[in-house]
Image (cartoon, grey):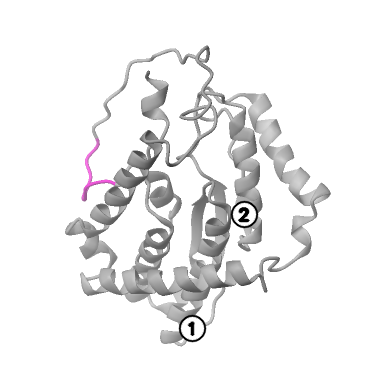
Amino acid sequence: IQADVYQNAGANHVQQIAISLAHAVEYLENFGADIADKIYFKFAVGSNYFFEVAKLRAFRYLWQLILAQYNKESDAFIFTSTSERNKSKLDIYNNVIRTTLEASSAVFGSSDAVFVNSYDEVNNETDFGLELAAKQQLLLQKESYLNQFTDPAAGSFYIESLTNQMAENALELFKTIQQAGGFVKALESETIQDFVYSSAKKEQHDFDEQITKLIGVNKYRNTADVIKKTPEENVVKQALFIPIVPTRLAEKEERK
C-alpha cells in the first residue's frame, strides 16, 4: 500500500491513515483476511515531528482494530521513507537536516524499516548524496541507539494523546470512505482526490504565506542561490481515475 503517495501529494496525517486503511480493506474484501500477512505499508514522514510519530502509531493501532473484525491477527509491516514534499533545490544542504529528523520520527513511530532519501535527490542525485543518506541511518542506529527500544514513544502523555486523537479522526474518515463504497468507488467518485487536493491547496497556501516555513526556501532565502531553469515536460499517461500526483512545496519558489 503506497501511502507515501498521499503524503507527498499533500494529504494531511488523518487522511493518510484513513485512505491507507480503506485501500487495505479493499484487499481484505477481495482476497480474504489471510492476505493481511502479505500486505506491507509504505509511508512517508515530513517535518512535523510529533505528528509523524503519532501518525504511524495510530495507523498500527487502527489496523489491529480492523483485522479484529475479520477475526485475524497480523502486525502491520511499515516501511517508511523520508518525505519528498518538503525538499528543495534551494539551500539544498538543509535537506540533510530534514531527512535526519524525519528518519528519527519514523523510528520513534515504530517503523519496521526506514529509508532515507539523499539530500540531492531533487537535483541530480550523486554518489556522495547516497553515501551520506546511508550514514545518516548508521548515525541514528550506532550513535543515537534508536534501535534499542520497541516503542520508545510509549508513555509520553503528549504523543499518546495525539495518537488517540489522530486514530479517532482517521477512523471517522475511514468510515466516510467506506460509506462512499470503499476505496475504489471513492476514487471513481473523486472523493479521495477531493480530500487530498483540498489539503494540498491549504498547505501550499500556508507555505506561500510563510505560515509553513522552509528555512532557506521561503524564509531566510539566500538571494544568490539561483536555480537554473529547465523546460517543464508534460507527460500524458492513461489512467482509470484522476491521479493523485506528488508535488513539492518549493517548486514555485525555485522558478522565481
For residue 72, which numbered disc appears in the image? 1
Outermost residue, right direction?
143
Q: Position of residue 126 (x, y in %)?
A: 61, 24
Asked if 122 appears above or below 27 in the picture, the reply is above
- The residue at the point 60 percent across, 40 percent down is 98
Asked if residue 213 is among those painted magenta in the image, a careful observer would answer no
Task: Say which quadrant the C terminus sits in.
Answer: top left
Provide the secondary structure element on which disc 1 rests: loop
Q: Amino acid at mark 1?
A: Lys
Task: Say which quadrant the N terminus sits in.
Answer: bottom left
Asked if 64 appears above or below 42 in the picture, the reply is below
What secondary structure do most residues of the magenta stretch adopt?
loop
From the viewer's side, name the closer residue of 82 and 217.
217
Q: Position of residue 73 (x, y in %)?
A: 53, 82
User: Left of 191 or right of it: where is 61?
Assistant: right
- The residue at the point 52 percent across, 47 percent down is 46
For residue 105, which numbered disc appears in the image? 2
From the viewer's side, name the closer residue of 240 and 55.
55
Q: Which residues are magenta?
A: 237-243
From the viewer's side, name the closer residue of 100 and 212.
212
User: Left of 215 or right of it: where is 141?
Assistant: right
- The residue at the point 26 percent across, 26 percent down is 234
Quarter of image, res 192: bottom left
Q: Position of residue 7 (x, y in %)?
A: 42, 50
How many C-alpha atoms fall within 10 Å of the one at disc 2: few (<14), some, or many (≥20)? many
